[in-house]
Image (cartoon, grey):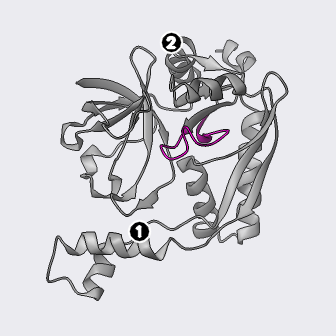
Amino acid sequence: MNQRILITVKTYPAISKTYGELVCTAGINEDGQWIRLYPVPFRKMEQYRKYEKYQWLTASIRRRARDVRPESYSPAVDSILLEEGIPTGKNRDWEARKDLILRKGDVYDDLADLIARAKNNHLSVATFKPADVFDVIVKPVEREWDKDKLAAIEAMHRQGDLFADDKDFSKQFRYVRKLPYEFSYRFADVNGKESTLMIEDWELGALYWNCIDKHGDSEEAAIQKVKDKFMKLWTERDLYLFLGTTKEWHFRSPNPFLVVGVFYPPKTDQLSLW
């Protein structure tokens, strides 16, 4: 079936033995319903098919046979048609986003309720409003991708060119750098239940590497800038979290959700001035 979707979620790229380098994306259709698009081989897509957050696209999608989560669909990459997005910077643009995400779509504030809905497979991605955000927690993790996964990806790429040598391969394919730290929000829901959930938003990874690559920051300085930015989204903006589950942990984990995106329109009093 064809669907028109406003992309609201792009996670930081990950690697997979099966699909290579992947970006998990999701969005909301014109009826306010969530749709997860996976797998999306973003690196292999032609430039004119690559989409940004808050860009409209139309695509032919089908339910994923091996993924029972209700929002999960596979896109036919060749069918993707891009439209104009909803830009940032103007209050009327934020209002257009809010109309689709907050008014047509559902917003939750009770995490236990969301977890119960996931366990019953009623949903696996949702818009969540925290009652309080306490901190951004940072934890060091493995600095390099899993070697077995990298070997599998390299083997996949070589199948497309039997004459490629090691040097040629390294020029043709450079996988995304792995983030050496895990960033998580520590927050409370409307009932005071505290949780710590990892943030996988593309914006966070891009900010970290931009601090190092473009501004010459140390890792410690880059970490602090990421923490400051994501806490300001709570203190200075009207913060909502896009929460999503992974296929592996959807039924198995006591809390299967991750923060797959952030939505941060200006606070209401700012919008009322427009």
Q: Is residue 48 left or right of residue 106?
A: left
Quadrant of the image occupied by residue 6 = top left
Q: Are marks 2 and 1 in contact (CB under 8 Å)?
A: no
Q: Amino acid at mark 2?
A: Lys
Residue 53, relative to residue 238: is it above or below? below
**Residue 88 x %, y %:** 53, 32
**Residue 228 x %, y %:** 77, 49
Residue 97 seen in the figure: yes
Q: Which residues are magenta?
A: 245-263
- The quarter in which the C terminus is drawn is top right
Mark 2 residue crowding within 10 angstroms, few (<14) / some (14–19) / many (20+)? some
Quadrant of the image occupied by residue 265 = top right
Residue 170, relative to residue 100: is it above or below? below
Question: Observer-nearest residue: 142 or 100?
Answer: 142
Q: Amino acid at mark 1?
A: Tyr
**Residue 166 x %, y %:** 29, 87
Residue annotated with mark 1? 175
Q: Residue at x 59, y 34 (%)?
A: 243
**Numbered circles on residues, count:** 2
Label 1 sits on a secondary structure element that is loop
Q: Is residue 135 left or right of residue 53?
A: right
Q: Is residue 236 left or right of residue 259?
A: right
Residue annotated with mark 2? 104
Residue 26, relative to residue 139: is it above or below? above
Quadrant of the image occupied by residue 252 = top right
Tell me which label, 2 or 1, sits earlier in the chain. 2
